[in-house]
Amino acid sequence: MRNFVRPFTAVLPAICALALLPICCAAFAQDPQVVDGIAAIVNGDVITYSQVRQLSAPRAKLLQSQFTGEELANKLKEVHQLALKDLIDRRLIIQAFKKESFAIPDHIVDQRVHDIIRESFGGDRNTFVKTLEAQNYSLGEFKEKEMERIIVQAMRSHNVKTNYIISPTKIEDFYRKHRELFTTKEEIKLRMIMISGQKDTGNAQAQKSLAEEVLGKLAAGGEFEQVAQIYSEDSTKDNGGDWGWIGRNTLAGPLEKFAFNMPVGRISNIIDYAGNYYILKVEDKRGGTTRSLAEARGDIEKKLIQDEAAQIQERWIASLREKAYIRTF
């Protein structure tokens, strides 16, 4: 027998997101009100509906607080399918581990249990054991679950190497195609005065004249905030026309174009848009800067390595599935 105790440092992508349950006894609680049954068979090993429910329970509970009706039913179905897929993959990994005649020393599992007792139960072993008993689990069963978890992590690490060398060309190509990932969100701190030109179609010229009068007051040194409180018909009137910090795609297209191209502190001319008259003031700007390739190189390399590891892991899992007898119910 060969010991298989190398550090578990493999990159774990989305496929194993459901594989690593929270380390707490509640994760293994059973639902005695639901009759159990066979959800899948993997090379003779049985996966039960209760195992699927246990794995999907945290996500299902969250969905039940967010959705109802048919939408909830569809989302719960997706979560259960993902949980079943993950359980099948885990079973295949454990079977591959046994086929290779690897072994995890018992002291590794004992240390893991010791860490759980220390971190989650304040070091109180009796409370930990009583919690297991209250949920109809023995210490031996809990250790078996932890052993399987360690095996899955170890096998993923063993079969997914992360010592790749990413060529400079690939890094530069990724940077060129995804510059937005390295650009901070552009925002402006905006104040606005809006004069409606649609109150009375027969008096449109009077409203435009009012907008010109307001602009004149600002040009003469009037405080934008105070003028907005008096004349603006925008919903931010009481706040002096203050829109706060806003990003792109917040304003209508023509207004956005003016606002994001204005220098800080400048007051715009009257903007005639959709029958209304607008006067804008940009008080500050932030963001919109792009990290250089040199600054982003490390992050790009890390991401490309992770992506490559994810693809290798999926190919490995797919090869296990192809060789296996899997039947779902």
Image (cartoon, helix red, strand yellow):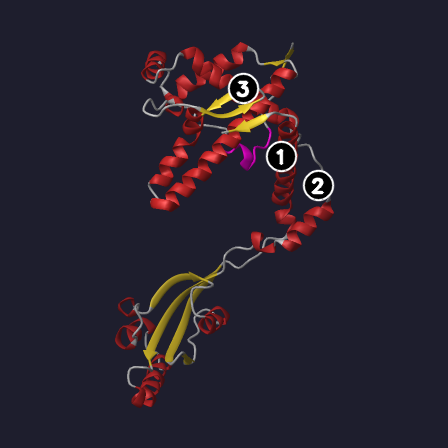
- Residue 166 is marked as 2
Measured Cα–Cα span from mark 1 to mark 2: 20 Å
- Residue 42 is marked as none
**x%, y% of residue 316?**
65, 30
Q: Are marks 3 and 2 in contact (CB under 8 Å)?
A: no
**x%, y% of residue 170?**
71, 47
Residue highlighted by disc 1: 314
User: Was residue 95 drawn as part of the magenta stretch in this picture?
Assistant: no
Q: Residues within 10 Å of mark 1 (few under 14, many from 20)?
A: some
Q: Is residue 67 visible?
A: no
Measured Cα–Cα span from mark 3 to mark 1: 22 Å
Going from N to C along the chain, the mark reached first, 3 or 1, is: 3
Q: Amino acid at mark 2?
A: Ile
**x%, y% of residue 255?**
44, 72
**Tag in front: 1 or 2:** 1
Going from N to C along the chain, the mark reached first, 1 or 2, is: 2
